[in-house]
Amino acid sequence: MSQVKNIEHPCPILAFVLGNYRNFNARATRDALLAYWDHISTDGRMFWAMAGAMSSAQLGISLAPAIRAGLIHGISVTGANLEESLFRLVAHTSYRDFPEYRYFAKHDDATLLANRLRRVTDTSIPEDEAFRAVEKIIVPMWERATHSGERRFWHEYFYELIRSIEPDDYDGDPDACWLLEAARQNLPLVVPGYEDSTFGNIFASYVKSGTCSAHIVKSGIEYMVDWYGCYETLSAGTGVGFFQIGGGIAGDFPICVVPSIKYDLGRPVKPWAYFCQISDSTTSYGSYSGATPNEKITWDKLTERTPMFVIESDATIVVPLILQALLECRSDPEAANAVIGRMRRE
């Protein structure tokens, strides 16, 4: 059996994953990475679905360079992840981390509340520097749209907002802000169930007060109608894959576009060309988040021939490894393919 040698590789992370990740979830990670590169290197596209609190976990450090490198071609994201990417850009130094959160008592969290810090596992979002600072910018946008009768998708308001922020006002690293990079590229975005977010609640309060009209934001149904066309564009040629973090509506909503086009619109449609889910949800009765990919075959979302991978792990550990290896592949395809060829022979 070959042993991993301590030598310098032109693609060190790629070589590390291929050399060390041999079985169990490590093997699934390696195989998903290789299939992702195979798909991208033949001009395929990749669509991401992102649940959880990945923006608060600073996954943008990995996502933003991947968007710039053409490794991610569209995203379905919760309203929370959308706004929390923005928060990291405008209020990063006001965040507070709590590595010992597991040992907190109730009064510790009550103290955070009194200090206007909203804890997300081991970090916290500062209310005044994040929520209230952004509110001062976005509410006038909503008011103008209310007066003009303009209607836009939820993410389009955030695209305009983040583009309008002057670089001198950045508090976080713009190169680590996935929303800023997506806005610059006008990346296709889907934000299903955006109402379930801090700014969804804030928007509802302004609708209730009569300050803003609910009609200025296009509905989830309109997101799906728009997504039909986006999917057909993305799936042209080699096709588009589906890379999912977590479960819930961020993944459920966009993956249904294939059977909906086929059965509801009655039009021919390419199936998803790849599927990978990173989740800590185990398979259980009725759990969509924990369902194995082959269950999706029965819904005509995937096919018998779709490359399918499930990585039962923490996305904050797995995703940076996968994306860094893919960035190495993108920057030096010849060297990457040589490493892959050599490792596959061992």
Image: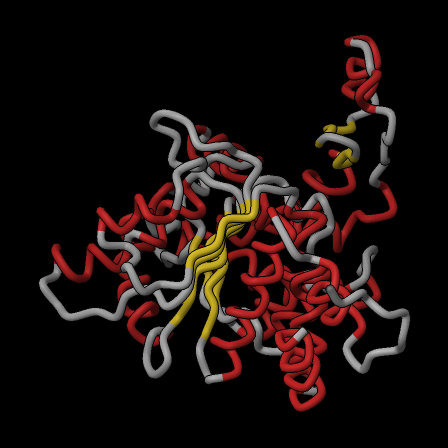
Residue at 64% in and 47% down: 315
Vertical comparison of 36 with 199: above or below: below
Q: Is residue 308 left or right of residue 279?
A: left
Q: Quadrant for the C terminus, please.
A: bottom right
Q: Nearer the viewer, residue 229 or 146?
A: 229
Q: Nearer the viewer, residue 208 or 35?
A: 35
The image shows residue 136 at horizontal and vertical percentages of 66, 45
The image shows residue 170 at horizontal and vertical percentages of 80, 60
Residue at 48% in and 54% down: 309
The image shows residue 26 at horizontal and vertical percentages of 65, 52
Q: Is residue 301 visible?
A: yes
Q: Is residue 267 left or right of residue 166?
A: left
Q: Is residue 262 left or right of residue 277?
A: left
In the rendered image, the residue lying farthest to the bottom is 334
Vertical comparison of 10 with 86: above or below: below
Residue at 64% in and 84% down: 337
In the rendered image, the residue lying farthest to the front is 1
Q: Is residue 144 visible?
A: no
